[in-house]
Image (cartoon, rainbow, N blue to C red):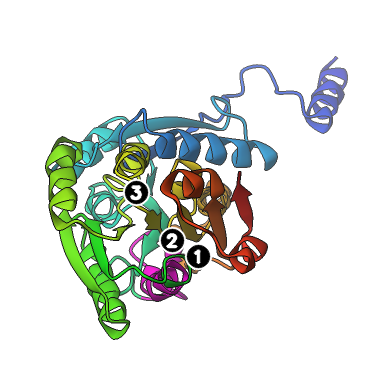
Amino acid sequence: MRRRNFLMSLAVVASGWPIEGRAAKPPVRIGFLCAGSATSQNSIDTIRTIKQSLSRQGLVESRDYEFEDRYAAGDYDRFPALARELSQAGVSIVLANTIASARAAQQLSPSVQVVMIGINNPVDVGLIASLARPGHNTTGMSVLAEDLTPKLLDLARELLPSAKSIAALFNPSNPSNPVLLERLQKAAGSAGMTVAAVELKSASGLETAFAGIAASRPDLLVLIPDLGTTVDLSENIASFARDRKLPSISIVPDYARLGGLMGYGVPSRDLFTKAAYFLKRILDGANAGDLPVEQPTRVELVVNLKIAKVLGVDVPATMVTRADEVID
């Protein structure tokens, strides 16, 4: 009898069936500390794409992992408290999509693993030691938006050769935004253009920002990327610009899909998919700080011809040919 039971147990193990009484491994709790709001298209796309990517890697929600999300809705002062909420909810990994949220996650005790979703220049702002050896229990994707900004301006000049004045919408609370604004001002000055900086710190300041843009009477509106404001509120900003017949562009390609004239930069989907890759590595036992931080391998140009028609902008045929996506 004992021999038969032993053989049956071996058969169960070999078949992959759980032995009765054996404790199942609980799902890992993953936190998402988001700069935007829960209802924004960017936030929805982020979570959906990450879950889809995890599914393709064989990971099942509720069985292998659980999601716990918190949203700052553009108010960066909320990150420390939201991070503590995630810690109290038992998360061991935190996804962070802006500098302030990553820093708040890094400061939690007990410590958690942190995965950055396309954060700008994390070495210079002190989030990681280096791309190759990040440390700080942190890994993910780094983007170099400073390098994309001059190219965006070159494309804008090709699209709007007579434009001389720019309104730049930015969030001074985001450490990367003043740097990007300065890069834009420098490039614009070299091209004989002027830049009027317009602050947008949260959704509640949108109407004031719109009034500031209108007062400067620009030829072009440039969105400096901030996930809590200019990215999260892209549809509102694009609608405002369209109604005022104001061309508007961003280094977030999705902006053109949401009603802007042009977007040039790193595809958001690539960043979300890569975040899932890092999550899988950590769930398999890797330490985030030992995983080299990666940089995007491609950029895309998206041009919205429907908006161009509304604005009365003639998009050069050469740009249409070069574009990765044309919305018409």
Bin the neighbour count of mark 3 within 10 Å (Cα to Cα): few under 14, some 14-19, many 20 and up. many
Label 2, secondary structure: give it. Answer: strand
Bin the neighbour count of mark 2 within 10 Å (Cα to Cα): few under 14, some 14-19, many 20 and up. many
Would residue 72 be visible to someone looking at this image? yes
Decide: marks 2, 1 in contact (CB < 8 A)? yes
The dot on residue 291 is 1
Quadrant in which the C terminus appears: top right
**Vertical side of 105 occupied by 42: above or below:** above
Image coords of residue 239 (percent x, y): 35, 38
Label 1, secondary structure: give it. Answer: loop
Q: CA distance from mark 2 to mark 1?
A: 6 Å
Q: Tell me the kind of residue under disc 1.
A: Leu
Between 231 and 190, which is closer to the camera in this rendering?
190
Image coords of residue 129 (percent x, y): 34, 74
The dot on residue 139 is 2
Q: Does the magenta segment cover residue 228?
A: no
Q: CA distance from mark 1 to mark 3?
A: 15 Å
- The extreme bottom residue here reads 190
Decide: marks 3, 2 in contact (CB < 8 A)? no
| Residue range (magenta) | 130-156
Q: Residue at x 58, y 26 (%)?
A: 63
Q: Residue at x 23, y 50 (%)?
A: 104
Quadrant in which the N terminus appears: top right
Q: Horizontally, is 220 left or right of 60 in the view?
A: left
Q: Tell me the kind of residue under disc 3.
A: Val
Q: Tell me the kind of residue under disc 2.
A: Thr
Between 134 and 161, which is closer to the camera in this rendering?
161
Between 116 and 305, which is closer to the camera in this rendering?
305
